Image (cartoon, rainbow, N blue to C red):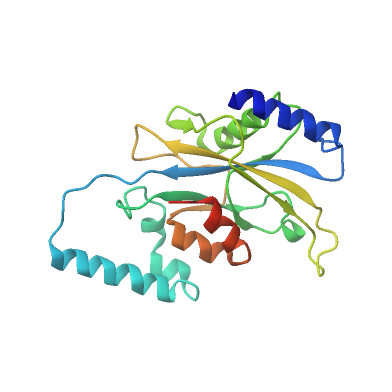
């Protein structure tokens, strides 16, 4: 059912002119998540300290994101074990102003793949080197957004971004490549990276 819906969506987009050769590109984007890890109940004092540390990081993160979070911690799948984590990459991506490095999800411009799901798989594969420890949830996109050029960046193209969900399975460590940097962030932290789209992501990411 989902595969049929995804194929119908792609045919509809093609019929409306959204193809690799049109001015409005289609981008397959992957929300790659690590599910919460079940851990033993901890001592109330330790839990209180962890809560304080988390709130302190949240308070100062906007001003000092790297110094406060710590690169080693932010890159680890072993942080925030009671929360879902999402992978963000830093580097050049389609639509970035002046092709400067920006924070973004794994993504790829749709070319001639049979489905958008295959395009999304290709995007994640290029980052991980394979899909051995991944599980794509469904064949159809979970959400989409239309990105329009900003007034001060008229040279930035407009495009459609379709989001697919994939999850980490069977491992606690992944080799992340094809980027200048990367972080694993909670939903709350993710909003700090995309303040202008915070409302959209807050609705898309239910948990």
| Residue at horizontal 78 percent and vertical 57 percent from the top | 148
| Residue at horizontal 72 percent and vertical 32 percent from the top | 9
The part of the image, by quadrant, that contains residue 55 is: bottom left
Left or right of 18 on screen, residue 56? left
Q: Could you tell me which quadrant the N terminus lies in? A: top right
Find residue 90 and report its horizontal and vertical position in percent. 57, 54
- In front: 137, or 98? 137
Find residue 146 and report its horizontal and vertical position in percent. 73, 51
| Residue at horizontal 72 percent and vertical 49 percent from the top | 94
The part of the image, by quadrant, that contains residue 69 is: bottom left
| Residue at horizontal 41 percent and vertical 39 percent from the top | 174
- In front: 100, or 22? 22
Left or right of 186 on screen, residue 145? right
Find residue 107 and report its horizontal and vertical position in percent. 63, 42
How many marks can you see? Answer: 0
Find residue 97 and report its horizontal and vertical position in percent. 74, 60
């Amino acid at each position: 059912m989902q595969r049929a819906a995804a194929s119908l969506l792609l045919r509809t987009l093609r019929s409306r002119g959204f193809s690799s050769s049109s001015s409005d590109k289609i981008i397959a984007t992957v929300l790659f998540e690590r599910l919460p890890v079940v851990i033993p109940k901890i001592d109330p004092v330790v839990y209180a300290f962890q809560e304080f540390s988390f709130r302190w990081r949240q308070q100062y993160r906007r001003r000092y994101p790297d110094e406060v979070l710590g690169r080693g911690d932010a890159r680890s799948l072993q942080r925030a074990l009671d929360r879902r984590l999402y992978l963000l990459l830093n580097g050049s991506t389609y639509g970035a102003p002046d092709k400067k490095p920006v924070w973004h999800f794994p993504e790829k411009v749709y070319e001639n793949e049979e489905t958008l799901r295959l395009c999304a798989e290709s995007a994640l594969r290029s980052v991980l080197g394979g899909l051995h420890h991944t599980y794509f949830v469904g064949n159809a996109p979970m959400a989409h957004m239309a990105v329009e050029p900003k007034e001060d960046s008229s040279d930035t193209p407009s495009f459609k971004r379709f989001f697919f969900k994939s999850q980490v399975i069977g491992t606690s460590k992944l080799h992340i490549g094809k980027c200048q940097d990367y972080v694993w962030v909670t939903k709350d932290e993710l909003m700090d990276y995309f303040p202008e789209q915070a409302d959209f992501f807050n609705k898309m990411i239910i948990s």
